[in-house]
Amino acid sequence: MAMNSILFPTDFSEAAENAQTVALSLARQLGARLHFLHSLNTVQQYVDMSLTSTGDPTMPGMEPELVIKAMNEQRLNAESALKKLVVEANEDSIEAEFHIVNENLEVAINKVVDDLSVGLIVMGTRGASGFREAFIGSNAQRVVRKCSVPVLTVNRACKEFNVNKVVYASDYLENEINDQIPRVAAFANSFKAQLHLIYINTMAYFEESSDTLKRIEKIKEQYEIEDAEVFIYNDYDIDDGILHYSDMVNADLIAIVTHGFSGLKKIVSDNVAESVVNHSSIPVLTLHIH
């Protein structure tokens, strides 16, 4: 998992500030270049201004000159805030630059990822109130589902992002998901962190522990994953089990794979991932397959 370039979208909110600390810490520890991204989303702003003044998005609303003036002021304010972030990063020996885009954030993120060969996105959420209320708005959910690079979500502030223990949760049944395990292992190795491969055994998806252990050990051998421990944890729900186990072992990060909504099994899997992101008190690394 190459992470020479990290993208950090921000709207300067408290949730963004929580993730900013992690983005800076990651960039410093990995020697990565940090890209700050802010979206003005000018089209939506115009609609919002029209609604405010007329109540009808199809009506002109505010005079175009006033709209342009307001947007220019917002751009100047954003530039000022982003320049301060770059200076702060530079003072911490981190190479950084900023980008301001007019498109909505989902489109902008994917374009910047391609243009700058971004290897990781760090973004903030507002926690257990729901991922659909993530700081970057309704687009956040689609970004996490569809983005081609891993996304690290953060919903609580921390002074320093230290990774000593990583928990990876899966049922280890799908080859396309198992193919992601080496990427998780590489991330853990970047920090010399201990990797836990866990299976959550529930009443709804119960299976003999011996069968589970054999399957995971076979996968470890197949992908040459040496420095990882295997654990089976019993719980009523998969998502709760992931959180409870991570809390029990004082994990620093949870890793999970999603593959967008396609088929009932995948919908269930992705719902688990979103629930973990919603309620986890520690950062969650979401990897994607398409």
Image (cartoon, rainbow, N blue to C red):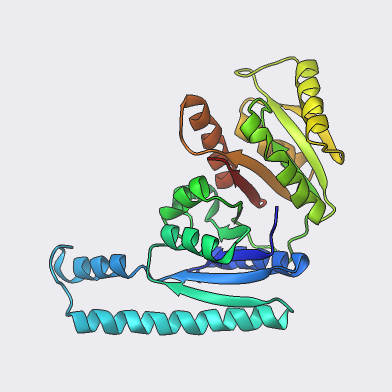
Q: In this view, does 174 lie above or below 63?
A: above
The quarter holding residue 172 reads top right
The answer to whether 112 appears left or right of 246 in the picture is left
Q: Can residue 81 be seen in this view?
A: yes
Q: In this view, does 183 lie above or below 87?
A: above
Residue visible at 63% across and 76% down in the picture: 96
The quarter holding residue 245 reads top right
The answer to whether 102 appears left or right of 290 in the picture is left
Q: Which residue lies furthest to the top in this view?
A: 208
Residue visible at 51% across and 35% down in the picture: 271
The answer to whether 108 appears left or right of 178 in the picture is left
- Whole-percent x and y of residue 57? 18, 63
Q: In this view, does 143 lie above or below 259?
A: below
Residue visible at 58% across and 77% down in the picture: 97
- Whole-percent x and y of residue 53? 18, 71
The quarter holding residue 180 reads top right
Residue visible at 30% across and 65% down in the picture: 44
- Whole-percent x and y of residue 34? 63, 70
Number of dots carrying numbers: 0
